[in-house]
Image (cartoon, rainbow, N blue to C red):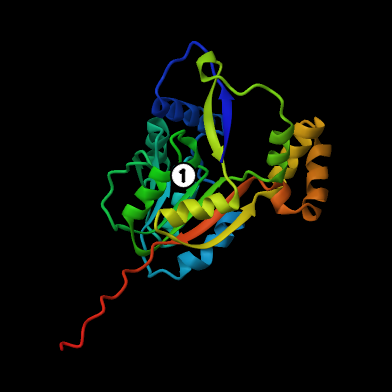
Amino acid sequence: MRKDFVEIDSTQSESEIAFVERYWTAVWEREGGPKAAINKIPGKAEYRIMQPYIESLSPGARLLDGGCGLGDWSAYLTRKGYPTLGLDISRSTVAKLKELFPDVEFAVGDIRETGLPADSFDGYFSWGTFEHFEEGLERCVAEAWRILKPGGYLFISVPFDNFRHALRATFDRRRKVDPRSGKERFYQWRLTRPEVRGLLARGGFSVLDIRPIHKRQGVLRSLHHEFGFPYEWLATKGLGIVLTPFIPGGLVAHMLMAVAKKPLPQPVERGDGI
């Protein structure tokens, strides 16, 4: 796994949980806050991958959206007939979500220790959240195992430590970040496909699928970071559209998505009574 860091105001001194809440509250506010526009969900790569598994569940299956952010996924799936609890660490965001989506359940919580009942969800999805704790992803996976019912599905996406990032790291001669400098702090982990598979398997899950997603976003990031193309240029966006079909996902895809299942209990073998 590879660490990413983010620049911070060196005058700020706060716990990891306070930093994560403050940072993501600001992100959601920059994006315009919670939105009622949920019509884009069916076209997203995550939904296309998870849809067959969700539709295999019983009607009314209960889902958890861990790190629900702007709330669009929670609202969409609830209205599709899958009651979904949207859980997020940002208290102000959750308050706004409750006002915007009164028919959807939202709560404030830490995905490492949700406080939710064991074996209570048929499916759990979390997009780009497990990786934001420096201690690692293991507690997030363990909590997912605890709250999922046997046979329940886990869907996660995490930043992909793709070939582009590996190549950059090989030739990156900058000094390693000194956390004592106060100028940067941990932001996220990047993982390879074998690392994601091993993480979920160690957590007791059966891994059903792992694949790169958001390749176009990765192409745009490459054009920006490696070649200096500004994101806002129409030429950058157009070049991204043209190049994306021809570049392998393993080279530039921005995220990895994994599908896993909590196995059903094995039947107890009975003796013949002799």
Q: Is residue 185 above or below residue 78?
A: above
Residue 39 visible from this viewpoint: no
Q: Is residue 102 left or right of residue 34?
A: left
Please report the residue visible at 56 percent of the width from the left and 41 percent of the height from the top: 1
For the C terminus, give its image quadrant.
bottom left
Badge 1: residue crowd in 10 Å (few <14, some 14–19, many ≥20): many
Residue 68 sits in quarter:
top left
Q: Nearer the viewer, residue 272 or 217?
A: 272
Give the x, y percent position of residue 58: 38, 70
Q: Give whichever of 25, 148 is nearer the camera.
A: 148
Q: Residue at x 46, y 44 (%)?
A: 71
Residue that lies at the very extreme toward the left in this rendered image: 274
In the picture as drawn, the residue positioned furthest to the front comes out as 274
Residue at 57% across / 45% down in the picture? 191
Looking at the image, residue 169 sits to the left or right of residue 50; the answer is right
Which residue is labeled 1 in the image?
71
Image quarter for residue 100? top left
Q: Nearer the viewer, residue 265 or 222?
A: 265
**SS of the residue at dot 1?**
loop
Q: Does 201 sit left or right of 272 as displayed?
A: right
Residue 77 seen by the camera: yes
Question: Identity of the amino acid at label 1?
Answer: Gly
Q: Position of residue 224 (x, y in %)?
A: 76, 33
- In percent of width and height, residue 92 lies at 40, 30
How many labels were placed on the picture?
1
Residue located 79% across and 48% down the image: 241
Quarter of the figure with residue 89 = top left
In the depicted structure, whether residue 154 falls above or below residue 132? below
